[in-house]
């Protein structure tokens, strides 16, 4: 373990200033919102939002949108309607709002069917049904503990509270999805807690060994390039106006060992990335009134890289990264508290990042048929990259037609693999992915994503055919239980055919009463208060 103080030497000009834009954001995101092959910039803050469009020639202009006057302190992009364009969730003081991306700067407010709280917002498919769900961690300050919520995507812009009640945290605002163990499903990290997904969205707490005083989000990345995810977090240091950063390597699946500590001022932001494409991770610490300090991974720990200091002309309070000019390195967008604006900086790295090779060796297995759907495993071989020995992630697209994304969207253009969002692939570091699919024929492909968020072209497309089968039914929870009535819930895998299903109920498992058969959602109000219930179903192949 290394406890590092900051270097103090002459700063170099690593970035070139390209311009300022007059909005004071709480959040900056980099996104290709219009799918034209270059990254744009979206800023959100108490005074409203700003969408700055990239013209592809180092030119940026703010465009007018219907969100300009919408105050929002949080923002997250994700293609939840699977049309190929990233949609938007905005965190406002009164709650979270969802907007469908219409292209060309137009956004349509969507009524999700449930009240979404305010907080940190993240998109991810936790239940493996191929659409994006919402993780929202409530904002909090110690000593208060706040909740983390999971909202399930029902399709058509509708969401429902999953009913999961995750353990309260001193910093629920730092909650996030991450497949930390690389097993092909999304786990959850909350300050002081790791929750492992046991498959399909059932979570168990696996550790609280990283608990401590109030701090921010875990940041996950394969720092040591051994093929699994590592992380860091920060917390105040002994009341001395300093932060201390703790870095952990994953040495066994789910097992972490601390390897570095770094000290810095309390009022600062940071970033973890390979900005110069030398195959090693750097850690940026943006300091108030001082140069930006940079530490580099040397194979064992993070060491001061005094030759790579940079002194921007303003204090950087918020930062976001992405290859804005498509020259093969990560450029920087910053926010200065004093200037009340955000700035764009071009990376002047001498070496360009080449994208990885597309994966090969695609195969698929039908594992089981359940009431939730047909559980499949998609497999591919690990890809290669000329600039990094390991640490690739993977993004999978699935469609009902060749070349599409209408089943699972990868946040990439299908034509060339260009990444619409600078983020890890939706399969993370795993070389497989578990999904629940209906019966039918599906077209799927996978791309590799490197540390610079460059995406490979998609692999050759593979076809998965799931034949029709007898239906499978499963009773769900009972809600709105009242004297004389209750609401039963159930799910049916129709086996790819028109299927009728109904509830049978009564005071014993002999039942004696039944509801009218339905071919749509299985939700019905029944009585009396005390009953047992089953859920038969039938199609032309069989009756359950």
Image (cartoon, helix red, strand yellow):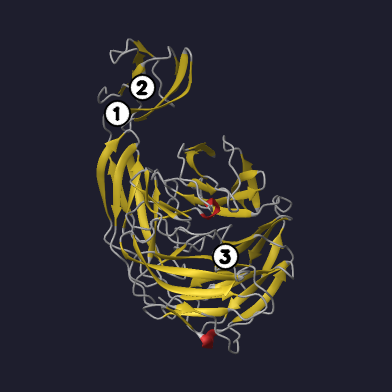
Q: Quadrant of residue 179?
A: bottom left
Residue 431 screen position, x and y as percent:
31, 59
Q: Secondary structure at mark 1?
A: loop
**Upstream in sequence: badge 1 or badge 3:** 3
Q: How far is mark 1 from mark 3, CA to CA? A: 45 Å
Q: Secondary structure at mark 2?
A: strand
Residue 391 screen position, x and y as percent:
37, 69
Q: Residue at x 40, y 67 (%)?
A: 248
- Residue 274 visible in the snapshot: no
Q: Secondary structure at mark 3?
A: loop
Q: Mark 2 highlights which residue? A: 501
Q: Mark 1 highlights which residue? A: 471
Q: Nearer the viewer, residue 378 or 225?
A: 225
- Residue 480 as seen in the image, left or right of residue 544: right
Q: How far is mark 2 from mark 1, CA to CA? A: 9 Å
**Upstream in sequence: badge 2 or badge 1:** 1
Q: Nearer the viewer, residue 500 or 502?
A: 502
Q: How far is mark 3 from mark 2, CA to CA? A: 48 Å
């Amino acid at each position: 373990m290394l406890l590092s103080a900051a270097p103090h030497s002459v700063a170099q000009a690593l970035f070139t200033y390209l311009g300022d834009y007059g909005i004071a954001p709480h959040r900056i995101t980099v996104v290709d919102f219009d799918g034209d092959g270059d990254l744009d910039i979206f800023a959100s803050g108490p005074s409203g939002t700003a969408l700055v469009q990239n013209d592809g020639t180092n030119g940026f202009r703010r465009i007018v949108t219907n969100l300009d006057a919408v105050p929002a302190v949080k923002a997250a992009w994700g293609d939840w309607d699977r049309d190929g364009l990233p949609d938007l969730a905005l965190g406002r003081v009164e709650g979270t709002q969802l907007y469908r991306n219409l292209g060309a700067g137009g956004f349509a407010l969507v009524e999700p069917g449930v009240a979404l709280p305010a907080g940190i917002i993240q998109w991810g498919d936790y239940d493996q049904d191929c659409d994006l769900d919402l993780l929202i961690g409530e904002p909090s300050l110690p000593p208060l503990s706040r909740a983390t919520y999971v909202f399930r995507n029902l399709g058509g812009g509708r969401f429902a509270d999953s009913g999961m009640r995750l353990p309260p945290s001193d910093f629920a605002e730092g909650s996030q999805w991450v497949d930390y163990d690389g097993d092909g499903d999304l786990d959850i990290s909350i300050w002081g807690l790791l929750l492992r997904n046991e498959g399909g969205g059932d979570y168990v707490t696996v550790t609280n060994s990283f608990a401590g005083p109030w701090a921010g989000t875990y940041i996950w990345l394969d720092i040591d390039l051994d093929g699994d995810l590592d992380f860091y977090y920060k917390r105040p240091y002994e009341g001395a106006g300093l932060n201390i950063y703790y870095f952990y390597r994953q040495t066994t699946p789910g097992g972490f060992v601390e390897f570095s500590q770094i000290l810095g001022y309390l009022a600062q932001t940071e970033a973890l990335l390979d900005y110069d494409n030398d195959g090693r991770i750097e850690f940026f610490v943006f300091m108030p009134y001082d140069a930006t300090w940079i530490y580099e991974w040397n194979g064992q720990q993070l060491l001061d890289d005094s030759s790579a200091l940079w002194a921007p002309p303003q204090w950087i309070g918020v930062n976001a990264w992405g290859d804005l000019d498509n020259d093969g390195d990560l450029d920087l967008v910053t926010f200065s508290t004093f200037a009340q604006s955000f700035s764009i900086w071009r990376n002047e790295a001498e070496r360009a990042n080449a994208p990885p090779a597309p994966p090969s060796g695609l195969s698929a297995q039908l594992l089981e048929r359940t009431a939730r759907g047909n559980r499949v495993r998609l497999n591919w071989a690990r890809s290669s990259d000329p600039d990094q020995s390991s640490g690739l992630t993977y993004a999978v697209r699935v469609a009902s037609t060749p070349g599409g994304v209408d089943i699972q969207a990868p946040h990439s253009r299908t034509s060339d693999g260009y990444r619409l969002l600078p983020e890890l692939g939706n399969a993370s570091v795993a070389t497989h992915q578990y999904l629940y699919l209906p019966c039918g024929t599906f077209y799927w492909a996978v791309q590799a994503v490197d540390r610079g968020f460059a995406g490979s072209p998609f692999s050759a497309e593979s076809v998965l055919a799931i034949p029709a089968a007898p239906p499978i039914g499963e009773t769900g929870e009972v809600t709105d239980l009242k004297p004389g009535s209750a609401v039963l819930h159930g799910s049916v895998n129709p086996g790819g055919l028109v299927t009728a299903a109904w509830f049978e109920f009564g005071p014993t498992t002999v039942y004696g009463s039944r509801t009218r058969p339905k071919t749509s959602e299985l939700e019905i109000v029944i009585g009396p208060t005390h009953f047992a219930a089953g859920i038969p179903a039938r199609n032309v192949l069989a009756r359950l």
